[in-house]
Image: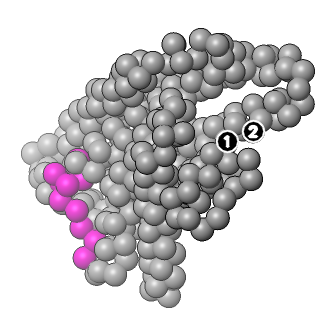
Amino acid sequence: MREPNQSSVTEFILLGCSSSPRTTPLLFSDFLMTYLLIILGNSLITILICLDSHLHTPMYFFISVLAMLDISYVTTTVPQMLVHLVRQKKTISYVGCVTQMCLFLVLGITEGWLFSVMAYDRYVAICHPLRYKVIMSPWLCGAMVVFCGLWGVICSLVYIVFTMRLPYCGPNEINHFFCEVPAVLKLACADTSLNDRVNFILGVILLLVPLSFILASYIRIFATILRIRSAQSRLKAFSTCASHITVVTMFCGPAMFMYMNPGANASPERDKKLALFYNVISAFLNPIIYSLRNKDVKRAFFKLTGWGRVPE
């Protein structure tokens, strides 16, 4: 037994994305530019939805919530990563690490379940268009978002309790660019097999269950779309759904590999790439996916700036 000689870790060292000084300036400039574009793009979408009355619909309400979640999500990790890229000392306190894990999980879980809510919204809009405004009332939309947030808080606490109940006695180097549960668990001075089982069960609840809801919604949606006689209407419906499916795939796919894979089989370098994908890249692409081919958003943008107009 090692317990008599154990001492608690008071801070962790984040090894980051690269140990090469030559690549540090390039990484810093790339991540800084990406972070600023994420803030700009998602903030712009949120402002447009708030200011333009034509965008005051359930679909755009959920998109605005997603945009705000993305801003918060990347802000829990990227600013600290940028600071560590230009500093020799790359430490984070024990409390800071726990706080970062908790915020990251709350926002990530909330976003994951928001995708299933957005799929239900598309299901009602396409399969029950005449009852859409009645079913998707402001009260129901708000209640579903609140549920996603509360579910995120509850499940993140389960993750945190099971992770931080373990002793951490050294080494204290986390091979990651932020405190994430799988990376932190590798430093535990105890058996983590229970945590692997808990993480797998939570992964099923938090990823496979909402993905099942999304799959069921889109099976019904595609069946309805194929019965539409107008080719233009079918194309419009498919285009709207394709945006959502792309976003869900980018976010949930890498997250499943990360959180449903046993710790013994995990690769630190692979995990960092996966985390970048569902934390940074998806938040960067979401505004592009939801606005680039969306005439309503373009129209609201040109109306706000006065730079031009989108053809009706």
Q: Position of residue 20 (x, y in %)?
A: 47, 82
| Front one among 124 and 88 | 124
Q: Which amino acid, by three-letter code, is at mark 1?
A: Ser
Q: Position of residue 243 (x, y in %)?
A: 67, 41
Residue 96 sits inside the magenta stretch: yes
Residue at 48 percent across and 73 percent down: it is 33
Q: In which quadrant of the rendered view does residue 78 lie?
A: bottom left
| Front one among 20 and 312 | 312
Q: Position of residue 92 (x, y in %)?
A: 22, 62
**What is the C-alpha distance between the residues marked 1 and 2?**
7 Å
- Residue 239's disc number: 2
Please rate how many residues cluster around mark 1, counting C-alpha atoms within 10 Å: few if below 14, some from 14 to 19, many from 20.
some
Image quarter hosting the N terminus: top left
The reply to whether discs 1 and 2 touch (Cβ–Cβ < 8 Å) is yes
Q: Which residues are magenta?
A: 89-98
- Residue 243's disc number: 1
Residue at 57 percent across and 24 percent down: it is 121
Tell me if I can see residue 286 in this picture: yes
Residue at 46 percent across and 22 percent down: it is 205
Q: In which quadrant of the rendered view does residue 24 lie?
A: bottom left
User: Could you tell whether 167 is left or right of 239 in the image?
Assistant: left
Q: How many marks?
A: 2
Q: Residue furthest bottom?
A: 22
Residue 131 position (above or below residue 5): above
